[in-house]
Amino acid sequence: MSHSWYTAAPMRTLTALNKTITDCTDCPRLVLYRQEIAEQKRKQYRDWDYWGRPVPGFGDPHARLYVLGLAPAAHGGNRTGRVFTGDRSGDWLYEALYRYGFANQADSHSKGDGLALTDCYIGATVRCAPPGNKPSPDEFERCSQYLQAEVRLLRNHRIVVVLGKIAFDHYLKTCRSQGRTIPVPAPRFGHGSVYRFPWGVTMLGSYHPSQQNTFTGKLTRPMFHAVFQRAKKEIDGF
């Protein structure tokens, strides 16, 4: 089943977009993988009824802060049905969002745990958990329609925190696809990078809070918190 609705009939609300995302079956490899993970489960989650579907965005539809990640984790978002929920990356993200007033609690373990975001929305470049955390180029391309629609529908976003170079690159690609002129030379990803675009959006770069980055010390909590402290300062300046 193909959902080439973006150019033909753009969704007018995030609710409609997210319903379309959760019904998507456009990428056979990802469909098979997410379903296999949901059936096999991880030992400590044997009692869980895994989500096993594409994971939509989450948060405040009027948000000024937009956080963009890579893809759901196999036993995180693919299990819980909510982006950055139930895994170590989410522990880091929600702690930072809580610290700077964008979330009402510092952790999140399930969709029903009471978490609410204020002035913040979280999305991903690919909506299904990919094998090895590596979507293929074709999978990025098929899923790009959802990122394009999400960016359009988040009309109030003024700050984008991109978690990792892939999110950085795909946000820029989305901007180009929507007729934005990217400055020359083109922005380059780096942790703590700041780019102000002429259409009123500021992009902040951050290393992704993956275990590969946090366990090795490439990303520390003070480094990560500094990005969201900057995001809060920028938003307070509007």
Image (cartoon, rainbow, N blue to C red):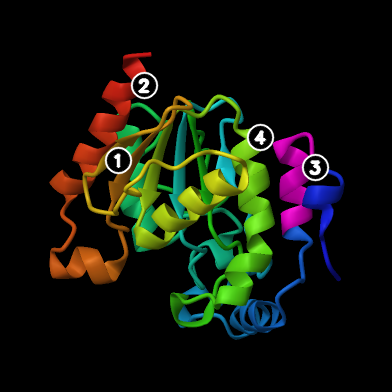
Q: Please name which of the two marks, 4 or 1, marks the residue nearer to the observer.
A: 4
Secondary structure under tag 2 reads: helix
Q: Earlier in the sequence, mark 3 or mark 2?
A: 3
Figure check: 169 above or below 228: below
The answer to whether marks 2 and 4 mark residues whose Cβ atoms lie closer than 8 Å is no
Q: Secondary structure at mark 1?
A: helix
Does residue 141 appear left or right of residue 169 in this picture? right
Q: Which residue is mark 2?
A: 235
| Vertical placement of residue 6 versus 30, above or below | above
Q: Position of residue 119 (x, y in %)?
A: 48, 26
Q: Earlier in the sequence, mark 4 or mark 3?
A: 3
Q: Which residue is mark 3?
A: 10
Horizontal and vertical percent for residue 127?
A: 60, 62
Is 45 a magenta residue? Answer: no
The reply, left or right, for residue 132 in relation to residue 55 is left
Q: Residue at x 38, y 48 (%)?
A: 162
- Viewer-nearest residue: 184 or 226: 184
User: The C terminus appears in which quarter of the rendering?
Assistant: top left
Q: Which residue is mark 1?
A: 96
Q: Disc 3 residue type? A: Pro
Q: Which residues are magenta?
A: 10-21
Q: Amino acid at mark 1?
A: Ala
**Left or right: 213 as drawn, with respect to 77:** left
Q: Earlier in the sequence, mark 2 or mark 1?
A: 1
Q: Quadrant of the N terminus?
A: bottom right
Look at mark 4 in the image and give the residue it sits on: 153
Q: Secondary structure at mark 3?
A: loop
